[in-house]
Amino acid sequence: MLPARMSGMSALGRLRTMLLSARTYMRQIYVLLGSALVLAFGLVDLGLVGSMVSAEVSMPVLLAVAIPVVVVPPVLLGLVPAVRQVEAVAAESLLGVEFVDGTPGPATTWPQRRRTSAWFVLHLVAGLLAGVALAIVVPLGITAIVRPLASDKSGIWWYVPAGVGMLIGAVAVCIVLGAVVTALAPRLLGPSVDDRLHALEQRAARLSERTRLARELHDSVGHALSLVVVQAGAARKVRDTDPTFVDGALEAVEAAARTALTDLDQVLGLLRDEESADSGEHRPVADLAQLDSLVLATRRAGLDVSLTVEGEVERMPAVVSRESYRIVQEALTNALRHGGSPVLIRLSVQTEALVIEAINPLSPGRRSRRAGRGLRGIQERVAVLGGDMTAGADDDRWRLRVQLPLPGEET
């Protein structure tokens, strides 16, 4: 008995809270907006039907014309893109609905338009039912309650409970309608599963692009700064004894800084304008065609670099050429920072793969090297292209080997 009594008290408490909540009545305002829309459509429909009845049109013809006239305009109006945003704003402010991805904007796809049209028709139906409850049932209930009190007739006492029941029923219908539209608003006005998947795919694409840009920035600017550090340090040591070397070092510093600024401008342009990223504008274009310039700049920094190319790297697919350039650039940067001379770079175009090898001596005391951002960047580039990578100490040398698959057709 006690649990049943507590359950009954809990239900009464919830009912009392619901009846005293301002949100309940805000929902009724939203539903009654549907009633106003129904009245607007109804005036037009009644005018047409009245004209046809006055013209003594047969019932089959009247139904054939009246039904489409009543149904089609609300459906078509719900397909208007802006209706979705208007209804969503009203649902947020009056129904208290919270959309997970923020307030929905205008419908941009036909599935969104169809769901918005269904919602708009549901809003009208809910408004029609609420209008009937408030405009017809409530007055009848009040009349039923008042009539026995104002009449001397006996036998009509049952009007009072009937009237009370009608009032309770009308209030219950309005409350239920408010709860129904509140529950369905996120499903019909908010994003569907496909919309969310599409949004997640776009977000993943943007994150992937930003990650790629971060790699580009790290590799290009990091390489340039390594050249600057090495050249500036060497020039400082011999500034009083070898002016010619100092001039060459400053020239190399200037060239490296200019290249870094160009790459930085390209990357920042992409970050500022995602549409430019989509269209390819400002996209870095460094590839194996600039490999000789990269090697020459590294040599100017005092690093002895030997480059061997086997095969026609000029005919590499664009993405392989671009990523291969960055891999070689990062290998040279690592040699500048952690290794020594000479550095051997070998590119071999094989039947189904491009093999890149970079070998350089280890600095004293560096028998192993912790995988930093540079090596992780190389790993990410290789993984994207479906290749293989090995890197590590081999006796007193550091060896990097990358194998990138090529298309099956002749390259």
Image (cartoon, helix red, strand yellow):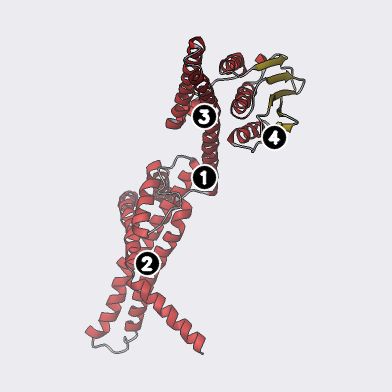
Looking at the image, which is closer to me, 58 or 180? 180
Element carrying mark 2: helix
Q: Is residue 185 above or below residue 138?
A: above
Q: Is residue 75 above or below residue 13?
A: above
Element carrying mark 4: loop
Say what amino acid the circle numbered 2 marks.
Cys
Precedes in sequence: disc 1 or disc 3:
1
**Few, some or many residues within 10 Å of mark 4 (<14, 14–19, 20+):** some
Q: Is residue 373 above or below residue 99?
A: above
Residue shown at the point (76%, 23%) measured from the top left: 352
Say what amino acid the circle numbered 3 marks.
Leu
Of the two numbered discs 2 and 3 in the rendering, the one whose residue sits closer to the viewer: 3
Disc sitting over residue 88 in the figure? none
**Figure quadrant of the C terminus:** top right
Precedes in sequence: disc 1 or disc 4:
1
Of the two numbered discs 1 and 3 in the rendering, the one whose residue sits closer to the viewer: 3
Indicate the position of residue 351 as horizontal and vertical percent values.
Answer: 77, 20
For the residues labelled 1 and 2, the Cα–Cα distance comes to 32 Å
For the residues labelled 4 and 2, the Cα–Cα distance comes to 78 Å
For mark 2, what is the residue? Answer: 174
Say what amino acid the circle numbered 4 marks.
Arg
For mark 3, what is the residue? Answer: 217
